[in-house]
Image: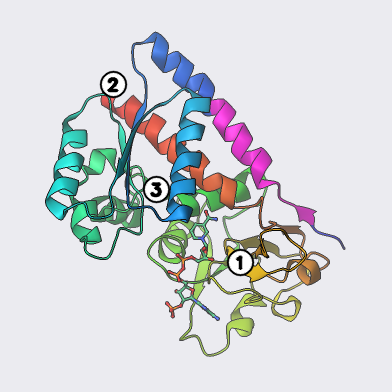
Amino acid sequence: MAARIIDGKQVAHDIRAELKKETAQLKEQGIVPGLGVILVGEDPASQSYVTAKERACAETGLYSDDNRLPADTTQADLVALIQNMNADPKIHGILVQLPLPKHLNEAEALLTIDPAKDVDGFHPVNVGRMVLGEKAFLPCTPHGVIQLLARSGVTIAGAHAVVVGRSNIVGKPLANMLLQKKENANATVTVCHTGTADIAYHTRQADIVIVAAGRPNTLTADMVKDGATVIDVGVNRVEDASRKSGFRLVGDVDFEAIKDKASLITPVPGGVGPMTIAMLLYNTVESAKRAMA
Ligand code: NAP
């Protein structure tokens, strides 16, 4: 059976359209949701991520405050800028694009962000609230995965979900979100990583497999049961001489083989990727609404 392909671009487009409406309503009440963006240095990938986020803000009606700082920016200057944004009522969300140059202390920078403006959901206060099941800003990529599942009609409650990967930005928060006794959650969750003895043993039992390992073909067809839902978070560059760029993007999942076995699957690109920015906008609008309340 050929799987239904989950169109992440369309789902992200729908969410952004909802947010555009909400933003227009907020504007009528005198509030423009604002995102403060900080990029240090000239890493090309980070530059293109930040440009995409700012473009998405503009298209959705959000204000963005663009701060591109030189690579030799000091920790003191970075912290001072974050503190200014914490105090600025026009800014409802603060985004420090990671990774920061090596001489800067990333943990200290993230701790400086007011948890009420931590729209990336990386501050320990928000991580703690999420784990406790309290109201929190949820990290954007894992929240995007939950939204993709829910909006594709996948029942998470009662499902066995296997997450491959345990990073602080994807695997761990995603496993925690799936585990919550809440709507769009309440799954039985298994987390696999490089220390797992037999990953296939776990993934073969999964109703939902989510792979965030950062390695092509981490999930192959023999590791998936018939009819499973497969979500591919991975983004990897592989050489491709037929492309002008010399490479193409692939996920962590053997898409071609698994699409004939799964019932639902996300492509790369066009699956989870577009959801991350949509959920960043969602958190910023949410923060603006909380600031009004
Ligand atoms: P990461 O920090 O490198 O973590 C990778 C995790 O996968 C680690 O927990 C690692 O296990 C595990 N892992 C690696 N190889 C494995 C294997 N062969 N078998 C089992 N587990 C394995 O990566 P990340 O930041 O979570 O990102 C994961 C992927 O998602 C990357 O391709 C990244 O580019 C992509 N990503 C995409 C988006 C998006 O918007 N679409 C956002 C974020 C990340 P250990 O803990 O044991 O080392």
**Rendering coords of residue 76 (x, y %):** 12, 50
> Callout 1: 10 Å neighbours few (<14), some, many (20+)?
some
- For disc 2, the marked residue is 292
Q: Amino acid at mark 3?
A: Leu
- For disc 3, the marked residue is 138
Task: Give the magenta part as a residue range.
Answer: 4-18
Q: Is residue 254 above or below residue 92?
A: below
Whether residues under marks 3 and 2 lie with C-beta atoms below 8 angstroms apart, the answer is no
Whether residues under marks 1 and 2 lie with C-beta atoms below 8 angstroms apart, the answer is no
Q: Amino acid at mark 2?
A: Met
Q: Is residue 181 visible?
A: no
- Ranked by sequence position, the earlier of labels 3 and 2 is 3
- Ranked by sequence position, the earlier of labels 1 and 2 is 1
Judge by depth and name the residue closer to the eye, 26 or 158: 26
Residue located at (57% from left, 88% from top): 198
Label 3 to label 2: alpha-carbon separation: 20 Å
Residue located at (51% from left, 73% from top): 190
Label 1 to label 2: alpha-carbon separation: 43 Å
- For disc 1, the marked residue is 237
- Ranked by sequence position, the earlier of labels 1 and 3 is 3
Judge by depth and name the residue closer to the eye, 106 or 149: 106
**Rendering coords of residue 141 (x, y %):** 49, 52
Q: Is residue 188 above or below residue 186?
A: below
Residue located at (45% from left, 61% from top): 170
Q: Please indicate whether residue 67 sits to the left or right of residue 191 in the image.
A: left
Label 1 to label 3: alpha-carbon separation: 27 Å
Q: Is residue 54 above or below residue 184?
A: above
Quarter residue 259 falls in: bottom right
Judge by depth and name the residue closer to the eye, 15 or 104: 104
Q: Amino acid at mark 1?
A: Arg
